[in-house]
Image (spheres, grey):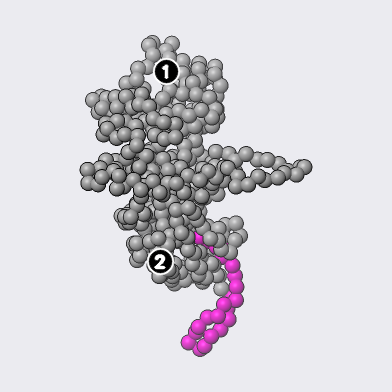
Amino acid sequence: MAEYKLLLPSMGEGVMEATIITWLFNEGDNVKEDDSVVEIATDKVDSDVPTPVSGKIVKILKQKDEVAKVGEAIAILEIEGEGGNTASEEVKTETPASAPDTETLKTIEEPLQAAANVEFSGDLYLSPLVKSIAQQENISESELKTIKGSGLEGRITKEDILAYVSNRGNQPVQQAAPVQEAAPAAVKTPVSAPVSTVSTAAGDEIIPMDRMRKIIAENMVKAKHIAPHVTSFIETDVTNVVKWRNKHKDIFEKREGEKLTFMPIFVKAIVKAIQDFPMINVSISGENIIKKKNINIGMATALPDGNLIVPVIKNADQLSLSGLAKAINDLAYRARNKKLRPEDTQGATYTISNVGSFGNLMGTPIIPQPQVAILAIGAIVKKPAVLETKDGDVIAIRQLMFMSHSYDHRVVDGSLGGMMLKHVHDYLQNWDLNTEI
């Protein structure tokens, strides 16, 4: 028999650690290859960790609510064979065939190990990767404190420190400090601390926020602190959209084995409007506007536990209606069943939220950072409406829907935000009944 160290696997770029939620097996239990053995949580998503080998769990190294680093052993298994697994064997087990060679791994691992010994004050959180870059570039703690972090709670990410390094020689540190120190100050407002003492009465129930709710709360406060929100509204006649979907939904499900919802139609209209107004597909970095090449649509999704997550449809402009339907159904299913990967929730450049799924007519959505706009779709309701015909105006029963467009007034003025919304409206209201699926 031999020992095998189960490592916390890589979970996507920028994710360096995870919190143990719960073990699905106990010490002494036998597990089979590919069994999910533990549930973990990152700042982005909850997921399961499978075991790449069969064996018996002899020791759990990381308990519930403890934090583990990527590549760190979280359990020891007893497996068939002789000799324990070495660090190199563990890397081979967890890494695809295209993994870096031994020399490349050495250049990555050695700085990380050295950086782990670097001491920083307790008020400065740095991931091992950021620490290693800081050490290699001789960046002092005082310099690090001038860097505006784009991560959770203003933490410095790999992209932040690399951007700082690339501009380090072009600008004196003392000139950058005032601007970089100002922004995080507002972002770091602790949402969990009450503004005032809240009295309780007999029978009141105190419910602590779970981990995801805390993250949502932090992100919402951060978004409102950073972006001055403006919201525009429009009512859209989606009668043609409803007719077209009713005509095709059964055929599509029979052919593809997938449900045809309204969401791919809405996303298609949004993508076309973004192509008309690409300056809505941007982010702000300091005093620079980053115009995004890819159109990645975030899709706000309610979870069974009442929390919210936003999986991302990558390169939505390159997908057909059928492709969008499949991508949306897949992401929604995996979100509700805790099967999303961290990369599934990263990289959104614009977001849509379907408040109509809860029977709401409209809402005022909060812009997810670092995006600059979000569209909320309301419920589709039959109403009497005035139609212009060649014989004059008539009143008819139509399928109407409100849309709400929130945008960041730092870079999106009313004209751009309003025209973008009007184009989405036009694409939906004039939906071609002969559109192929």
Return the mark for residue 416: none
- Determine the residue positioned at 38% across, 11% down: 83
Q: Residue furthest left?
A: 169
- Determine the residue positioned at 51% across, 60% down: 376
Kind of residue sitting beneath label 1: Tyr
Return the mark for residue 413: 2
Residue 58, x across and y down, in percent:
50, 16
Is residue 337 visible in this depiction of the protein?
no
Task: Relative to 398, say whether 155 is above or below.
Answer: above
Q: Name the residue under label 1.
A: 4
The foreground one among 87 and 317 is 87
Is residue 145 visible in this depiction of the protein?
yes
The foreground one among 251 and 286 is 286
- Residue 181 horizontal side relative to residue 189, left or right: left
206 part of magenta stretch = no
Q: Which residue lies furthest to the right in this view?
A: 202
Residue 280, x across and y down, in percent:
38, 61
Main SS class of the magenta portion in the image: strand
Contact? badges 2 and 1 (CB < 8 Å): no
Mark 1 is surrounded, within 10 Å at the Cα level, by few (under 14), some (14 to 19) or many (20 or more) other residues, namely: many
The foreground one among 436 and 352 is 352
> Of marks 2 and 1, which one's residue comes earlier in the chain?
1
Which is in the foreground here, disc 2 or disc 1?
A: 2
- Determine the residue positioned at 47% across, 44% down: 188
Magenta region: 375-397
Q: SS at mark 2?
A: loop
Kind of residue sitting beneath label 2: Asp
Task: Relative to 421, say whether 191 is above or below.
Answer: above
- Determine the residue positioned at 42% across, 62% down: 409
Residue 185, x across and y down, in percent:
45, 46
